[in-house]
Amino acid sequence: MRRDELVRYLDRYLRIDAIPDYGPQGLQVEGGGEVTRIVFTVDAGLPCVDAAIKVGAQMQIVHHGLFWGSQELIRGPFGRKVQRLLNANLNLYAAHLALDAHPEVGNNVELARLLELAVESWFCNVKGTDIGVIAQAPDGATLEELASMLKARLGSEPRLLAHGPTQVRRVAIISGSGIDHAREAAALGADTFITGETSHAHYYAAQELGLNVLFAGHYASETVGLKALGRHLNGKFGLETVFIDLPTGM
């Protein structure tokens, strides 16, 4: 498939130009003009780039791309990474908030689907776009069952703050770093909040809100959208799509 055709499709499907972000998204490094194999990695670190090159990909799609608002000089570690991409003729495509917010393959709707939760509404407005979801749990669902399912289906050990009810009814989900929106989630009637990262500062906030919180890990919580996008592109275009798991432990 021609790269430009694929990029046009991705830009439309993910609404790249319509969703403001911390830096430019979409095609960040232009490589070869033909794409048959796409590698998906959460990050664009040098080991991630090397892994994509090793398996002979023509395009790498990432959630955390190269640009975050400040201008980068093409030198030092950043310059070596860009040079590695260019030398390998490897296209690099990034989708950050656009992938969090996507209603079909987004990180948050996909987490809800994996946990058999029914999405009811969106919240957590970031730069003008709601990226988080509020979802309904099945009747009789318990916190213990939800935590076990999260562990089994993400393959990571979630950290649990059990400050709310043992029976789960309404679940807020924000992949990655979303705990700052705990108060908003509680105000919307959530009794349980699933996100990625934690810190000491949020322990008492969750307790005071009477909110269960499951921290699934920033990395693990943001693998699901890329995997779903890979399945979508494989089904639509017959492209070979490969997810390479390079966990950071965070």
Image: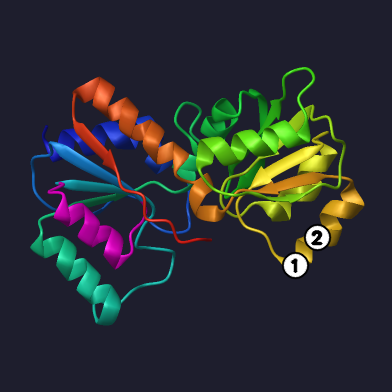
Residue 30 visible in image: no
Q: Which residue is drawn at 76% across and 35% down?
A: 143
Q: Are marks 2 and 1 in contact (CB under 8 Å)?
A: yes
What residue is shown with label 1?
200
Q: In which quarter of the image is residue 185?
A: top right
Q: Is residue 85 left or right of residue 163?
A: left
Give how far across and how far down residue 2 sits, in percent: 11, 35
Q: Residue at x 39, y 41 (%)?
A: 16
Q: Give the range drawn in magenta.
A: 42-57
In the rendered image of this protein, does residue 112 appear above or below residue 29? above
Q: Residue 38 carries which label?
A: none
Q: What element carries label 2?
A: helix
Q: Determine if the magenta segment contains residue 117.
A: no
Q: In which quarter of the image is residue 167?
A: top right
Give how far across and how far down residue 111 sits, in percent: 56, 34
Determine crowd level at label 1: few under 14, some 14-19, many 20+ residues with C-alpha closer than 10 A: few
Q: In this view, does 247 lie to the left or right of 211?
A: left
Label 2 to label 1: alpha-carbon separation:
6 Å
Q: Which amino acid does label 2 sit on?
A: Tyr
Determine crowd level at label 2: few under 14, some 14-19, many 20+ residues with C-alpha closer than 10 A: few
What residue is shown with label 2?
203
**Front position in the image: 244 or 11:** 244
Q: Is mark 1 on a helix, strand or loop?
A: helix
**Front position in the image: 158 or 132:** 158
